[in-house]
Amino acid sequence: MARTVRETERKYDAADGVRLPDPAAVAGVAAAQPGGVTALDALYYDTEDRRLAADGLTLRRRTGGPDPGWHLKLPVRPDVRDEIRAPLADAVPPELAALVRSRVRGAALVPVMRLRTRREVTLLTDVTGRF
């Protein structure tokens, strides 16, 4: 069973030498604690001629982290996407394949890129100790 999560993602560039502020100094944050390192392994799928990417869609199979599984990201508006998630499986889940059928028009969905990352996690809590 797939489920949908709306995400807002913004990316920022900082000038050379600019450091991020201490997270504990941000309004509403009472404490910042190391949360360890998370290893992610994502295999991205598209057609050979990149039809999904041309329409701003992303389809990936990812392991590691708090949400392993299949993720289909659909643009909603600038910086906002709906992420439809399906459980981890070896092949593209039929429900996600059906959602991109009009874009791939019969072309095969194949692995086009693999991205392995390590995230250093910082846990932020408020004054009640909630994350």
Image (tube, grey):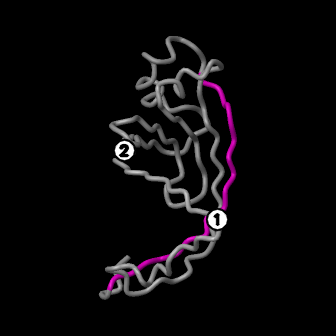
Where does the image place residue 95, in percent across and percent down from the top left?
42, 30
Q: Is residue 103 above or below residue 27?
A: above
Where does the image place residue 125, in percent across and percent down from the top left?
39, 81
Disc 1 on helix, strand or loop? loop
Principal secondary structure, stretch drawn in magenta = strand
Judge depth for marks 1 and 2 and give the one in front: 1
Q: Quadrant of the N terminus?
A: top left
> What residue is shown with label 1?
16
Mark 1 vs mark 2: which is more N-terminal? Answer: 1
**Is residue 123 in the magenta section?**
yes
**Is residue 58 in the magenta section?**
no
Q: Is residue 112 above or below residue 21?
A: above
Residue 53 disc label? none
The residue drawn where x is 65% and y is 20% is 48
The residue drawn where x is 66% and y is 31% is 111
Q: Assess whether mark 2 and mark 1 are in contact (beta carbons under 8 angstroms).
A: no
Q: Residues within 10 Å of mark 1 (few under 14, many from 20)?
A: few
Q: Nearer the viewer, residue 21 or 115?
A: 21
Q: Quadrant of the C terminus?
A: bottom left
Q: Nearer the viewer, residue 8 or 129?
A: 8
Give the magenta-colored segment's residue range.
109-126
Q: Quadrant of residue 29?
A: bottom left
The residue drawn where x is 48% and y is 45% is 87
Residue 80 disc label? 2
Amino acid found under the numbered disc labelled 1: Asp
Where does the image place residue 90, in percent across and percent down from the top left?
61, 37
Q: CA distance from mark 1 to mark 2?
A: 28 Å
Amino acid found under the numbered disc labelled 2: Val
Q: Is residue 123 above or below residue 61?
A: below
